Each structure stands twice: as C-alpha cells, then as structure tokens.
Amino acid sequence: MTDSNALDSRPDRNDPHDPGLSETMTERESYLRAGHTLRSWLLTTDHKRIAILYLITVTVFFFIGGAAAVLMRADLVTPQGDLLSNEGYNRAFTLHGVIMVWFFLIPSIPTTFGNFLIPLMIGARDLAFPRLNLLSWYIYMLGGLFTIYVLIAGGVDTGWTFYTPLSSMFANGHVVLVAVAVFIVGFSSIFTGLNFIVTVHKLRAPGMTWGRLRLFIWSHYATSLILVLATPVLSMTLVLMAAERLFGIGVFDPKLGGDPILFQHLFWFYSHPAVYIMVLPAIGVASELVAAAAHKPIFGYWFVAGSSIAIAIISFLVWGHHMFVAGQSMYASAVFSFLSLAVAVPSGIKIYNWTATLYKGHIALDPPFFFAASFIGLFVVGGLTGLVVAMMAVDVHVHDTYFVIAHFHYIMVGGTVSAYFGALHFWWPKMVGRTYFLVWGRLTAIFIFLGFNLTFFPQYILGYLGMPRRYHVYDPAFQVLNVLSSAGASILAIAYVLPFAYLIYSMRYGDPAGPNPWGVTGLEWTVPSPPPKENFAEIPVVTTGPYDYPMELESRDG
C-alpha cells in the first residue's frame, strides 16, 4: 500500500551493519522497559497502549456479563426456577444486559482494535487527540465502577431498557445509579467517536485518499457518526428519567402529566442506531478477514464502503419497529416497517460482496477466516429474522418472546463477538509480536459457532411457541428446548474462555511473528510487531489501492 521508495528509505531493522540500528534498538528497548511500569500505562497517550487497556477492561466486563448469563441459563433448566428468586432473576438479566450492551458490545471493537489500528492503517503516528483518548478510558472505567457498586449494593430489576414507569416509580433506588453509570460511559463513546472522525479527516498519510481507506476505517467512521449523533439522546433521556424519580418532574409519569411512551421513543431513537454501533465495526473486521483469507481485493469496494454509510443513516429512521404494540399510529408503524426492511439492503450488499470476494480465492483456512465465516453465518440468520420482526403482523405475535431474544443475540452477540475474536486472532501477532497455535484458534471458532447455535436457535422455537421473555418460571412443555439452550450456553462459555489460555501462553512461548505473519497488505503490516511508539520511522506515501495483492498466497502450517 505504500510507496516503495518511502519504505526503502527506512533503516533495515534486520541489518546488523546499519549504522542507525543501535540507535533504533536503544529507543525501542527503552520504550519497552518503560511499558513495564504501572505509571507509564496509566498515564500513556499512546493509542496502542490505550487500546490494550481497553482490551483488558472490556474483557473483564465481558466475563462479568457472561457470568450473569450462565446463572440465568442454569436457573432456566427447570420450569420452577429453583435457583433464583423472582427478584434475583430480574436483577441477573438486568445486570447481564447493562454490562454486555454498554460495557462490552458497544465499546469492544472500536475502543480496542479501532484504537490500535486506525492510526496504523491511515499512516498516522497517533489519534488526533491522544489525551482525550486516555480520558475516554478513565471515563469508561468510572462508569464501570458505578455499575460494579450497584451490583454489590443489590442490583437493579428494571431490565437494561429502564422502561418507565417501572424505572421512574417502582424500581429500587439503585436504578438512578445505573442510569448515572450509563450516562457517564456515554461520554466515553462520544469522545472516542469524535477522535476517530477528526483522525480520519485530518491525519491520513500523503496519498491516502478516501478511495484508498480500508473498509475497517469506513465502518468505524460510520460508527463514529452514530456515536456522536445518537449518544446524547440517550444521555438526555436518562437525565430526565432520574430527574423525574428524584424531583417529581413530570416527563414520563402520567400522574404528573408525562407520557411513558415518550421514553420508548427517545430510548429507541438511540438504541436502534446503537445496534449498528455494535455491528458496523464487526462488519469492518469481517471485510478485512475475508480479503485476507481470499488474498483478493474486496469485490465492489465502493458498494461495501457506501453501504456502511447507508446503514448509519437509515438506522436513525427505524426506531418505531420496537413499538408496534405500544399504541402508535398504524400508519407510522407501516412506515417504520418499510424502513426496517430497507435497512437490510445495504447489509445484504455486504454479504453478497464478501461471497463474491471468496469466490475462486486461494482461501487460507486460518483461525481468522473461521471466525469470519462464523460471523457471516450468524449475521445472516439474525438479519433474516430481523426481517420477520420488522413485519407488523408477525411482530405482534412474537413481540416480547424468546424469538426477539434469539434475533438480537444472533446479531449483537453472535455476530459481534465472533468478529471480536476474529480480530483478536488476526491482529494478536501484531499487538504482542508472537504467534499462537493455529489449531486451537480453529477449534475455538468451531466451538463458538456450534455452542452459539445450540444456545439460541431453540429460543426461536420457544418464542414462536409463545414463551415470553424475562420469565424464569415457565410451562413444563418448554423444558426440553430450555435444557438444550442451557447446554449450548455451557459449551459457549468454555469456548469463550479457551482463547485466553493459549493467547496468554503465546505471549511468552509463541514464535516471533515478524511484521507480516499472514502475508497480507496494509500499512499496519509494514511495521514491526509490536509496532514502535511512533508507528512509522517516516510517514509513508500511499500510491496503491487498499487491497492490492500482487503476491501469491503462501501456505502456512498450524
């Protein structure tokens, strides 16, 4: 992707006779030594270290939210709900939803891999606002600590949507603290999105035109637009809800002259675009993994890039499909139904273009490809069932059933988490400079795909048969499907834990990765692994397209 003269002008880091080698190595060793102190990590403005800080913290929250899910599935093995009380079950699924949505799914890929890769992919030395980047992590941690405090203090039982009047009138007092936590973490999202937008506009390397940006960048740019435009709506909504509860201001409470349906309009105006905050970065990852696996340019580059922007725009116009049974106008519901079907078009474009990219490609069956295939499969199933719930007549039947739970888990969890692990396996050698055992990566991807389908596909059937969501005492006729779902959850839990064993092991015992262990294109693969503090010895000059593959795919054993 870079001008060969620019690359040739850099010192050869492997040439022992290079007079600049000793100075380069001294600087690098000093940088690595500095990284061993806690203070250097907590005060760093290096985008790569901040990305690793996010990687550690979002992973911790992922396992906290996952533990709540395991507790719920264990309780649902029996129809009587023997493990948890009614209130305990409500608190468990609220904790699961709050942690997974706002502390893992939304920040996971942008804050970790977006932070690490965007400057490297566009030829910059850092993000536009390094200190703001570090501040966003501290804000994220502050919101997380508030949430952990609420967990210790007794939890919240409203569900992650905080629907009024339950949240403003009847729930326990901790709901305000959770609202404060989500309000705080919203600023972290806004700052991150703003940083990415300015970086992409202002810090691209010479020759890095919009048509030479990686699709990973396009998806994060679209995500950042949603973060900046939609997150303030959620923040204002939570402030109004807290003000009504604390001060009796009539906004959503009918007794005070408010309207509880207004809360749903405001909440979903943010929360449906938020679905694409989770999915668009995953789509960008999938584009990179598909191109790398096929060793080919992405088919229809401009269509895939444009579809990301189209998804970001249309996502603001579909919130009403969550409210088909909330009493809104039939004509409004018809418009929202049409727009919800329309948003599937740009998503479908990506699927067809990925398939065309893989066609006749020399596909490398490395772990990243397995995770990309898992993402595509789960995303297609979730997307097709999204068309089902977008139709008014069907949605009335399956609304607030396990069908809806299965649908959004296929999109938000199955798709996003598969892409997250795919990105982790693809860029791990770049981040730590060591390789891992490829066979373990392949097995993990397979187990995640099988475990996820065993967990959530039975829930489609449960929902269609009429089992309502948020119930832990249910008709014994539903027990077999619930047992299957819980068995799948146990497989999924093991598959999620497994990578951290062999990836952490690889940090000490893995073979040196080299700059480009996958033999792919991209500016991030032209620098050492892990990258030096300033990323590039000289800012590169870009003269070629984003996915030019002049070389033949080399075979790799694992």
Image: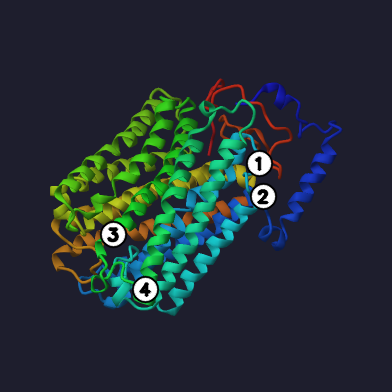
Q: Mark 3 vs mark 1: which is more N-terminal?
A: 3
Q: Mark 3, mark 1: which one is toward the viewer?
A: 3
Q: Do residues under tags 2 and 4 come within 8 Å of each other at their CB atoms? A: no
Residue, disc 1 = 529
Q: How many C-alpha atoms fall within 10 Å of the one at disc 3: few (<14), some, or many (≥20)?
A: many
Q: Residue at x 71, y 62 (%)?
A: 39
Q: Nearer the viewer, residue 443 or 173?
A: 173
Q: Mark 1 vs mark 4: which is more N-terminal?
A: 4
Q: Nearer the viewer, residue 449 or 105?
A: 105
Q: Check the picture and name the quadrant holding the N terminus.
A: top right
Q: Residue at x 78, y 48 (%)?
A: 29
Q: Mark 2 vs mark 1: which is more N-terminal?
A: 2
Q: Is residue 110 positioned above or below 67 on the image? A: above
Is residue 509 visible to us here? no
Q: In the image, what residue type sits under mark 3?
A: Gln
Real-space Cα separation, disc 3 to disc 4, in angstroms: 19 Å
Q: Residue at x 29, y 56 (%)?
A: 265
Real-space Cα separation, disc 2 to disc 3, in angstroms: 40 Å
